[in-house]
Image (cartoon, grey):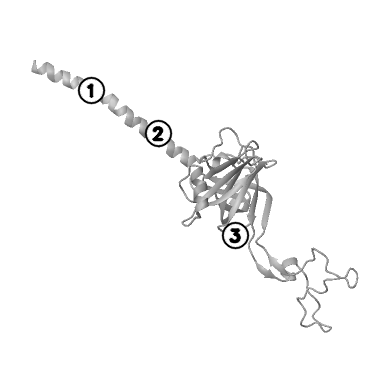
Amino acid sequence: MINTLLGIKKEMTSTYDSRGRRVGATVVEITPNSITQVKTTEGKDGYNAIQLGLGTKKSVRKPQIGHAKKAGLDQKIRWFREVKTEASEDTQPGQVINLDQVFSIGDEVKVIGTSKGKGFQGGMRRHGFHGGPKTHGQSDRMRAPGAIGSGTTPGRVLKGKKMAGHMGSNQVTTRGLEVVKIDKQNNLLVIKGAVPGATGGLVLITKLGRIKGYTPPPEEKPDEEEQAVAASLEAKAEEATEAPVSEAPAEAEKVEGEENASS
């Protein structure tokens, strides 16, 4: 069973959860995903997985176009991602999976995305170093990382030392997020909290189960004014339907009276 779909991160907003609390949320656009390939242990791949395709692009490389045509898809697919799962008998290449077939309100999901790239950064921003003292001869070394080794022994810089370097642009996974709203018409999924990645970036959303202690929101009851308006409209509709029935016998009697007078 497929429990993962590809989506595009949109803007952040605020909404209300099942308890009526206002929370920050991220909007993810999940257009229908296409199955482009099915891999099984019996085949040449040797493992169970499903390849999903999402999005279109004006300029796509020829191998990607041929791969999509092999699955029976005419559109130029932009992103391909593989999901390790056991395919059922109904899962075939070219099949389309919609948003509401996988997710529902109250689901617990994890989101995998690529974090924003920050470029080359120093130790203070990258690792939260506090910097050196501003006095005692170090007025120009406030943001320096300080010593990076321990002297003659071992005489080298140990692996994993926190230093300046490239920051961001890494795969980040956020677990324990909650689905608070689904817009089927616009293919939008609203997830409580922050989602890794930049706006317009590709994210993988995997369903983990249901949120513990989730209670669906109570149904809204109509106001007294709305009930009165609805009752008046129903009464008018009934009068409109009964009026022709009551007039029909009178018209028949009138016709009979004219026939008798002429005879």
Q: Secondary structure at mark 2?
A: helix
User: Which residue is outermost to the bottom?
Assistant: 137
The residue to which callout 2 is attached is 234
User: Which residue is outermost to the front?
Assistant: 44
Kindly indicate the quadrant of the structure image that contains residue 194.
bottom right
Q: Looking at the image, is mark 1 or mark 2 nearer the viewer? A: 2
Mark 3 belongs to which amino acid?
A: Ala
Q: Secondary structure at mark 3?
A: loop
> Could you tell whether 179 is left or right of 229 in the image?
right
- Tell me the crowding category of disc 2: few under 14, some 14 to 19, or many 20 or more residues within 10 angstroms, Cα based: few
- Tags 3 and 2 touching, CB below 8 Å: no
Vertical placement of residue 240 versus 6, above or below: above
Residue drawn at the location 61% of the way across and 49% of the way down = 204
Kindly indicate the quadrant of the structure image that contains residue 10.
bottom right
Which is nearer the eye, 41 or 116? 41
The residue to which callout 1 is attached is 250
How far apart are labels 3 and 2 at the CA level? 52 Å
Across and down, in percent, residue 88 comes to 60, 34
Mark 2 belongs to which amino acid?
A: Glu
> Could you tell whether 144 is left or right of 172 in the image?
right
Q: Earlier in the sequence, mark 1 or mark 3?
A: 3
